Every structure is written in structure tokens, then in C-alpha cells.
Image: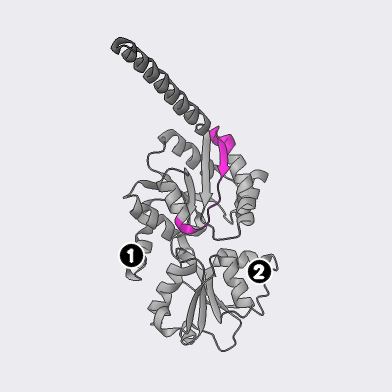
């Protein structure tokens, strides 16, 4: 092959390859556009998270004009990384996981809305043991938290224990992590641990559904209120889309059949705007407890 022919061949090959790459890129953009990828921290069973999200997903799809896909994750850390690595567009975070995402991304995530209940969220400590009536009674006992990255199932309960001069790592016989709030209740009810800590919303739901007998498994301490859950997006999301999502949440009204169904599933009276500054106390508690480096 002459030099001239070789150059012509390479030029043709390069042009064809570039065209193929452009086509592939366009195809990828086309397949990924028009989709809002949503996830949530796995603080309950995956089937329950899917059930709770379905009506909300349908509502958001109509409000935004996008196809809404719910992507379950294996653990709390995966929800943080999924948003930061752009594999997910919006996540239902706990206060601590939001703080982790905000720190990991160097401030490149934006909390949009939270339930009105999340402005003064609480955790409960539960037990089956008659001799446990206050936090100080946990000394020398076994205790289950939820996930290590859970605000209401670990960080804030740990913070209040430290406030009562109980160091979980040195003053308790054993500390376990169940991975989810409902699993913590099961561990206490099954006698695997003397006590457990979880979020009050899941506790109340399990009691209402008669999945736990409060006469057998009882609450012996309820924490003061703190900011918790929110819906967070990446800061580089199109501002118009951010507004559509925010407006959709704020428009949810319990006086309408659709609004009532969604709000009841989300255990909310309404959604309200939120901001990063609301979670400064959570970040401070996490740093004080040595859970945020």
C-alpha cells in the first residue's frame, strides 16, 4: 500500500470510528435522557420502600414529564455514592446521610424538601426487659442500632446516650447493627438484644399495623426533636427541573385522594422547603461522636 493510499485508508477508518463513537454517545444520551432516577436509603425492607414510592413516582412523572425509575440500593453508603457518581438523580436521605453526601461532594448536593415532621424528628429506645426504664439502665446490657449511617437509628441515639454519660462502645455489654429499623424491632422482640433504637415513624407504623405488641416491646425513652430526612438532588441539576420537583412536593394536599394516599404512605402531613443549614447540628453531632471524618 502506498503512503498516499495508507493515509486515505487511515483517514476513512478514523472518520468511521469517530462516527460510531458519536452515534454511541448519542444513543446513550437518548436512552438516559427523559428519566429521573430516584433512590432511598434502605432503612426498611426493599419491598416496603418500593410500595411506598410507587404512587409518589407516578405523581412525579406527571409533574416533571419524565419517566421516574426507583433504584433500590444495598446500603446507606451506596445511596451517597450513587448520587455523587451521577448514577442517581434524587435520593431520600436521612439527616446523617445527607451530611455525608454533602461532605463527600464538597457541597455539590442540594436538599429540596422535607416532611413537616422532619423538622422535629425523634428516635425511640425500646425493650422487653422490665428492669430497663431509662437510658442509664442500659449500662452492661446489649443494644441494637439500625444502620451505622442512620441518623435516627444510630447517630442521634448514640448522641443522646453520650449525653446521658453512657458510652455505647465501653459501657454496654455488646452493640449490634441490624441494618434497618424494622430489623431492630425484630431483634428486640426476638430476645437477641436487651434494647434497640429506631426512628419513631417506623415504630408507630409497626404498632398501627399490629406487627409488634407495645405491651411486650415497649418504648422506655423518646429523644428530643432534631432535623432528619429530606429529598436531595445534585446541585448541577437543571434549575427548572429542581423547581418542578419542589413545586410538586409542596403541592401535595391531603384533601385530595391522590395527595392523601401519597402523604399517608410517606407518613407526612405535608412537605416543606429545606436547606443545608438545617443539618448543621447533625453534622456537629456526627463529628462529636467520631462518625464523620
Residue 61 sits in which quadrant? top right
Position in image of residue 277 (x %, y %): 35, 54
Q: How is the image coloured?
A: one colour
Q: Is residue 208 left or right of residue 230?
A: right
Q: Is residue 249 magenta?
A: no
Q: Residue furthest right?
A: 210
Q: Is residue 182 above or below residue 249?
A: below
Number of labels in the image equals 2
What segment is highlighted magenta in the picture? 61-77
Q: Residue at x 59, y 43 (%)?
A: 57
Of pointers 2 and 1, the one earlier in the residue sequence? 2
CA gap between label 2 and label 1 equals 32 Å
Q: Which residue is mark 2?
A: 207
Q: Residue at x 41, y 45 (%)?
A: 85
Q: Is residue 63 magenta?
A: yes
Q: Residue furthest front?
A: 1
Q: Residues within 10 Å of mark 2 (few under 14, many from 20)?
A: few
Amino acid at each position: 500500500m502506498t503512503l498516499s493510499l495508507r493515509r486515505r485508508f487511515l483517514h476513512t477508518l478514523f472518520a468511521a470510528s469517530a462516527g460510531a463513537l458519536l452515534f454511541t454517545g448519542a444513543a446513550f444520551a437518548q436512552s438516559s435522557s427523559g428519566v429521573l432516577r430516584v433512590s432511598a436509603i434502605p432503612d426498611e425492607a426493599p419491598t416496603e420502600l418500593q410500595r411506598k414510592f410507587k404512587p409518589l413516582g407516578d405523581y412525579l412523572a406527571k409533574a416533571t414529564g419524565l419517566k421516574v425509575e426507583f433504584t433500590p440500593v444495598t446500603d446507606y453508603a451506596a445511596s451517597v455514592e450513587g448520587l455523587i457518581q451521577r448514577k442517581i438523580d434524587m435520593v431520600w436521605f436521612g439527616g446523617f446521610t445527607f451530611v455525608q453526601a454533602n461532605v463527600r461532594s464538597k457541597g455539590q448536593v442540594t436538599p429540596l424538601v422535607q416532611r413537616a415532621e422532619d423538622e422535629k424528628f425523634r428516635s425511640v429506645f425500646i425493650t422487653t426487659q422490665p428492669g430497663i426504664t431509662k437510658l442509664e439502665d442500659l449500662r452492661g446490657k446489649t443494644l441494637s442500632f439500625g444502620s451505622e449511617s442512620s441518623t435516627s437509628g444510630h447517630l442521634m441515639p448514640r448522641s443522646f446516650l453520650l449525653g446521658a454519660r453512657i458510652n455505647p462502645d465501653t459501657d454496654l455489654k455488646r452493640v449490634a447493627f441490624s441494618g434497618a429499623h424494622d430489623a431492630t424491632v425484630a431483634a428486640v422482640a426476638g430476645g437477641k438484644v436487651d434494647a434497640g433504637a429506631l426512628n419513631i415513624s417506623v415504630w408507630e407504623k409497626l404498632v398501627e399495623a399490629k406487627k409488634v405488641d407495645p405491651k411486650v416491646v415497649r418504648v422506655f425513652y423518646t429523644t428530643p426533636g432534631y432535623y432528619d430526612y429530606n429529598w436531595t438532588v445534585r446541585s448541577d441539576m437543571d434549575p427548572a427541573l429542581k423547581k418542578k420537583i419542589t413545586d410538586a412536593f409542596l403541592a401535595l394536599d391531603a384533601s385530595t385522594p391522590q395527595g392523601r394516599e401519597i402523604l399517608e404512605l410517606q407518613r407526612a402531613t405535608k412537605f416543606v422547603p429545606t436547606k443545608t443549614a438545617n443539618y448543621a447540628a447533625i453534622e456537629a453531632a456526627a463529628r462529636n461522636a467520631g462518625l464523620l471524618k
